[in-house]
């Protein structure tokens, strides 16, 4: 099945999950496909937290859910949405361990603080940006985390190959942080790739 039929792909994933899991099991999913020529992201957000696009002009675009979670319903539809990504834009996805990290007073870090932290550090390269945001979460919530924190992100940058040709490059990185009490074998991991 081609990704051209993204809605059918998502329906197949839901069907497989529905038929092969317990009655009350479900999953959230954020699936995205980037088209370099069109500078466009097509995505399906199945009950996951919204993605955040920090545009170079300082605006923030939320990539909200396009359907409900996977696996709970046999009859399930998924809409596909799109957004443009241009040079200087940053796309960030995150798990609830990031926004639900709480301070000693019981306040959550939240989406607003996350967006502010991303904006404050968006000029950094992707791995440094993600590391700086993780540090802000850990300063806000210094006690041991009770949930994993995952923050993949990518930045759009123009790179010149010659005086006549400019190429849009996608720089991406991801930070995964597992609380020691949940899985002491898994280290903090920072990955960076240039496509």
Image: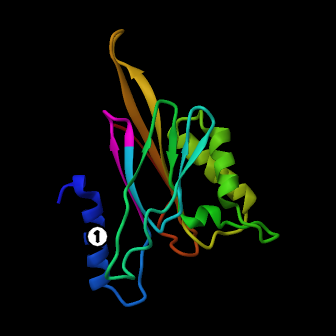
Residue 59, percent from left and from top: 61, 39
**How many badges with numbers are in the image?**
1
Q: Residue lying furthest top in this view? A: 163
Can you see residue 188?
no
Can you see residue 54?
yes
Q: Residue at x 31, y 78 (%)?
A: 17
Q: Nearer the viewer, residue 102 or 53?
A: 53
For residue 36: magenta?
yes
**Quarter of the image where one finds residue 5:** bottom left
Q: Is disc 1 placed on a helix, strand or loop? A: helix
Q: Please determine whether, in this image, residue 63 is positioned above or below residue 103.
A: above
Q: Residue lying furthest right in this view? A: 105
Residue 45, percent from left and from top: 43, 61
For residue 130: magenta?
no
Residue 14, percent from left and from top: 31, 74
Q: Residue lying furthest left in this view? A: 1
Which residue matches tag 1?
11
- Mark 1 closeness class: few <14, some 14–19, many ≥20 residues within 10 Å: some
Residue 153, percent from left and from top: 49, 47
Q: Residue at x 42, y 74 (%)?
A: 27
**Quarter of the image where one finds residue 76:** bottom left
Q: Please determine whether, in this image, residue 160 is positioned above or below residue 36.
A: above
Q: Main secondary structure of the magenta part?
A: strand
Q: Which residues are magenta?
A: 29-40
Task: State the quadrant of the C terminus.
Answer: top left
Q: Residue at x 60, y 44 (%)?
A: 60
Q: Please determine whether, in this image, residue 32 is positioned above or below residue 27.
A: above
Q: Nearer the viewer, residue 138 or 24?
A: 24
């Amino acid at each position: 099945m081609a990704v051209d039929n993204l809605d059918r792909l998502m329906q197949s994933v839901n069907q497989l999950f529905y038929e092969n899991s317990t009655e009350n099991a479900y999953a959230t999913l954020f699936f995205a496909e980037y088209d370099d020529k069109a500078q466009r992201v097509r995505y399906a957000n199945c009950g996951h937290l919204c993605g955040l696009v920090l545009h170079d002009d300082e605006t923030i675009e939320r990539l909200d859910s396009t359907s409900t979670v996977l696996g709970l319903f046999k009859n399930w539809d998924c809409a596909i949405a799109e957004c443009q990504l241009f040079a200087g834009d940053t796309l960030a996805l995150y798990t609830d361990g990031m926004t639900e990290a709480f301070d000693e007073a019981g306040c959550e870090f939240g989406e607003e603080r996350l967006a502010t932290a991303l904006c404050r550090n968006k000029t950094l390269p992707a791995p440094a940006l993600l590391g700086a945001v993780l540090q802000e979460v850990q300063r806000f919530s210094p006690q041991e985390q009770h949930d994993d924190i995952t923050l993949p992100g990518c930045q759009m940058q123009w790179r010149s190959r010659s005086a006549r040709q400019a190429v849009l490059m996608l720089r991406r990185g991801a930070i995964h942080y597992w609380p020691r009490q949940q899985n002491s074998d898994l280290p903090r991991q920072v990955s960076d790739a240039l496509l």
